[in-house]
Amino acid sequence: MAKIKIKKIRSEIKKPGNQKKTLLALGLKKIGQVVEHEDSPNILGMVKKVEHLVSVEK
């Protein structure tokens, strides 16, 4: 499978708890942090939930 890079670009302050937990599950804690994950349906669903807080590169 292909890898995708996910970068946190906005803060999760004043966002619902499930979005905060999704960012932690992706491994994103600080703004500007980049993580690499497999391009799986589970990861893409989590990215879709917080797409306003992250940017994605293929």
Image (cartoon, helix red, strand yellow):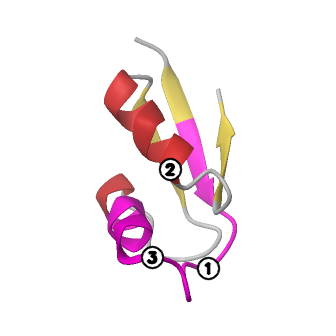
Query: Which corner quadrant of the image does residue 38 belong to?
Result: top left
Amino acid type at image mark 1:
Ser
Q: Are marks 2 and 1 in contact (CB under 8 Å)?
A: no
Q: How many marks?
A: 3
- Residue topped by disc 2: 49
Question: In what element is the residue under mark 3?
Answer: loop
- Residue topped by disc 1: 11
Answer few, some or many: residues within 10 Å of disc 3's Cα (few below 14, many 20 plus, some between 14 and 19). Answer: few
The percent position of residue 42, horizontal first and vertical second, equals 33, 32
Amino acid type at image mark 2:
Lys
Tell us which disc is closer to us: 2 or 1.
2
Residue at x 57% of width, y 40% of height: 5
- Residue topped by disc 3: 16
Question: In what element is the residue under mark 1?
Answer: loop
The percent position of residue 28, horizontal first and vertical second, equals 44, 65
**Residue segment shown in magenta:** 5-24
The percent position of residue 51, horizontal first and vertical second, equals 62, 50
Residue at x 64% of width, y 26% of height: 58
Query: Which corner quadrant of the image does residue 45 belong to?
Result: top left
Q: Distance between the Cα atoms at labels 2 and 3? A: 11 Å
Outermost residue, front side: 16
Is 33 on the left-hand or right-hand side of 56?
left
Question: In what element is the residue under mark 2?
Answer: helix
Residue at x 64% of width, y 63% of height: 53
Is 32 on the left-hand or right-hand side of 49?
right
Residue at x 51% of width, y 44% of height: 47
Amino acid type at image mark 3:
Pro
Up the image or down, 11 lies above or below 48; here it is below
**Of callouts 2 and 3, the N-terminal one:** 3
